[in-house]
Image (cartoon, rainbow, N blue to C red):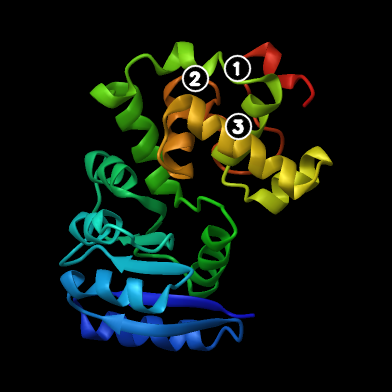
Amino acid sequence: MSLRVIVVSAQALTREALLRVIESSGDITVVAAVGDHSAAADLVRAHRPDVVIVDSRGCGGDAIAALRGRPGGSAAQVLLLDHDANDRDTARALRSGASGLLGADVSAAGLLSAVRAVANGGTPLSAVATRMLVTHFRSAPSPGLQGVPSAMLALTPREQEVTALAAQGRNNDEIAEHLSVSLFTVRTHIRHSLRKLGARNRAQLVALAFKTGLVSTRSAGGGGQPYVSSPAARGSA
């Protein structure tokens, strides 16, 4: 079954380019494309897509808030194409409900990979977005994140490890393979971690992993073993 996508961009040229790239994938279908973010929420409710791609130019955080704020709205994952973000805008997008952030220089292959990743529970973040995210949450914690360091200790060793792997940008399938556990087990750990930390989505969970020092910034690139600050995090499930 192909993934269903809605494209939201105020730029007609951008919408057309995204349509061409996505339709060339063979496994992803654009069910709607719109330039007005106020109409996007209704389209999401009508089509129930897996992923909504939001172009930050002309809408950005406002579009994400509109998609997430409608009662009874879809559980679609939001992938933001961020053109001129700073660390504050990146953090705001995550708080508004973005599941992934890509830079304007993303390749066609990178975009398609990111769509598949967010649909599978991943959090694709461009290198620039990751640096901005870490900078923001380390230098200016928001009121909603107070007390999180102690809450992070409430996670089990395996929940800490799964969170660290998620902070590397790995999706659920990759985490399950890395830890030699079932996909159901990974999803359970992610769900429990979200609940314990009061995070609304996976992207916020990743932000908290950096903010609390659970994960070192040197592990943000995605390769190799995650650096988990807590010795207990190397335990078993």
Q: Position of residue 79 (x, y in %)?
A: 40, 61
Residue 227 visible within the image: no
Whether residues under marks 1 and 3 lie with C-beta atoms below 8 angstroms apart, the answer is no
Amino acid type, label 2: Gly
Image-based side of 177 in relation to 135, left or right: right
Residue beneath disc 2: 213
Ranked by sequence position, the earlier of labels 1 and 3 is 3
Amino acid type, label 3: Ala
Residue beneath disc 1: 229
Instruction: Look at the numbered disc 1 and give the secondary structure of its residue.
Output: loop
Q: Is residue 138 above or below residue 109?
A: above
Residue 98 visible within the image: yes
Amino acid type, label 1: Ser
Whether residues under marks 1 and 2 lie with C-beta atoms below 8 angstroms apart, the answer is yes
Residue beneath disc 3: 164
Image-quadrant location for residue 32: bottom left
Residue in the image at 50% along x and 84% along y: 29
Instruction: Look at the numbered disc 3 and give the secondary structure of its residue.
Output: helix
Instruction: Look at the numbered disc 2 and give the secondary structure of its residue.
Output: loop
Residue 159 image label: none
Ranked by sequence position, the earlier of labels 1 and 2 is 2
Image-quadrant location for residue 8: bottom left
**Classed neighbour count for the residue bearing mark 3: other residues with Cα under 10 Å, few (<14), some (14–19), many (≥20):** many
Q: Is residue 71 above or below residue 32?
A: above
Residue in the image at 25% along x and 81% along y: 34
Image-based side of 109 in relation to 227, left or right: left
Whether residues under marks 2 and 3 lie with C-beta atoms below 8 angstroms apart, the answer is no
114 vs 29, nearest the viewer = 29
Q: Position of residue 233 (x, y in %)?
A: 68, 19
**Classed neighbour count for the residue bearing mark 2: other residues with Cα under 10 Å, few (<14), some (14–19), many (≥20):** some
